[in-house]
Amino acid sequence: MTQNVRQFILHGVTQDGHRFRPSDWAERLAGVMASFRPPGAAGNHLTYSPYVVPVLIDGERCVVVDQRLRDLEPLAWKFVMDFARDNGLKTSERTV
């Protein structure tokens, strides 16, 4: 049985329609969050966390944040949510 996972998506476009800069913002944000991993998960400093992943969606840089991050580390979740709010990024949610 598979559990549905809610994801929060930060889009590389601001609320007023401008492309968010710098162009590598998604990779930078995901890099900062790389140490937050599921308990027992293998990984090193050269890989992204499975909870915070930079992706391209319809040609737009985005960061997909798994809501399980909130349970693992509430302050990391707050950091990502504050980043989106403070920079006026468009956001959306999906369940996979």
Image (cartoon, helix red, strand yellow):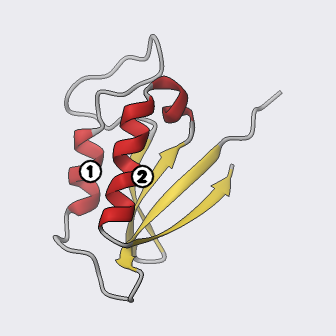
Residue assigned mark 1:
29
Residue assigned mark 2:
81
Q: Which one is earlier in the sequence, the residue at label 1 or at label 2?
A: 1
Q: Would residue 33 be found to the left or right of residue 3 on screen?
A: left
Quarter where residue 56 is shown: bottom left
Q: Nearer the viewer, mark 1 or mark 2?
A: 2
Quarter where residue 32 is shown: top left
Characterize the local packing of mark 2: few (<14), some (14-19) or many (20 or more) Cα atoms within 10 angstroms: some
Residue 28's place in the image compared with 41, above or below, is below
Q: Would residue 24 be found to the left or right of residue 7 on screen?
A: left
Residue 46 position, x and y percent, is 20, 33
Residue 6 position, x and y percent, is 65, 46
Which residue type carries mark 1?
Answer: Leu
* Residue at the spot 49% in from the left edge and 34% down from the top edge: 69
Q: Outermost residue, top direction?
A: 40
Q: Quadrant of the N terminus?
A: top right
